[in-house]
Image: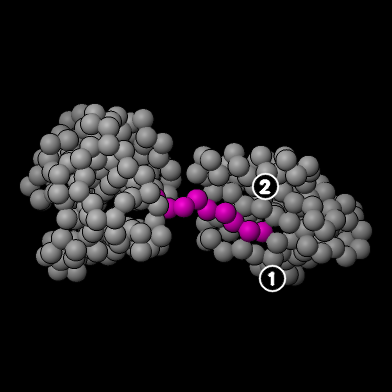
Amino acid sequence: MKPEEYASAIASLASKKEPFAVATVVKVEGSTLGKPGFKVVVSNQGDVVAGTLGGVCPESAIASVALETMRTGEPRTIKVFLEDVGSAVGAVVKSQKPDEIHVETNCGGSMEVYVEPFLPSERLILVGNGGKDDVEDYLVRLAKLLDLETIVIDHMPVLTDQPDTLIKEADYDISKFEFAPSDSVVVLTKGERDVSVLESVLKKKPGVRFIGLLASRKRAKEDQDELVKKGFDETLVGSIHTPIGVDIGAVTPAEIALSIIADIIAVRHGKHLPHKG
């Protein structure tokens, strides 16, 4: 693979905020078509979009491993045995080692392949309503401490720290925003634009991992009922985190912001923590 082809494939996936993995041959023994330095780029669909490991058989097996590393975020080194059909089947039955793969090919050698996932930066997207909002301000500050890429969509925010991106267009159309699967969206529109903003974001599901609304229980119920009337599935509407934030007894704006961040982190790790009753 030419260096420019490798760079182009990675740049394309990174620009789309998509996870991907790079698998590189680091060592070979015996007869193999793949040599040290051979590599492939694997998309989050499990497709080899660039490069080669020396054949379809090892590439298909490694693509499955690549998907697993994208899920866990942890790199792995895999030993791939390139064997005839009988040997491969027998070895699969005997071997339970998670970092060994036996594939059907007549090369007879083996390769060690390092599989490294590349995950997009997680983004916190805050949709505000203009003016001073201490919760919004603290969310930006906490997000920066946690290395979250922070985007604020607010025509007139009052912030202590500057977000990574600030969209101040007064009538910005949220539906035009390019969301990523790892995004977390927090709606802080105070009732005036709750439904219209949530409507735009819900249309992106399941392309957004977390959607939360800061509102009283009464307003949240009214907003959700309105969304159902507009034709949104009740289960989808029910996935909105509202009341947003895990139950830590938060009272002050800083504590509320902390509870929201904790809610987002819990979802990231597949945890379901108690919310305010």
- What residue is shown at x 64% (from left), y 64% (from top)? 76
Q: In the picture shown, does residue 55 fall above or below 110?
A: above
Callout in the foreground (1, 2): 2
Callout 1 touching callout 2 (CB < 8 Å): no
Q: Which mark is residue 41?
A: 2
Horizontal and vertical percent position of residue 161: 29, 55
Q: Is residue 118 magenta?
A: yes
Q: Is residue 25 magenta?
A: no
Q: Number of callouts in the render?
A: 2
Q: Amino acid at mark 2?
A: Val
- What residue is shown at x 34% (from left), y 46% (from top)? 151
Segment colored magenta? 115-123
- What residue is shown at x 72% (from left), y 39% (from top)? 5
Q: Amino acid at mark 1?
A: Lys
As helix, strand or loop, the secondary structure at mark 1 comes to loop
Q: Which mark is residue 223?
A: none
Cα separation between marks 1 and 2: 25 Å
Horizontal and vertical percent position of residue 169: 27, 32
Compared across the picture, whether 65 is left or right of 71 comes to: right
In depth, the one of 150 and 266 nearer the eye is: 150
Figure coloring: one colour
Ranked by sequence position, the earlier of labels 1 and 2 is 2
Residue under label 1: 97
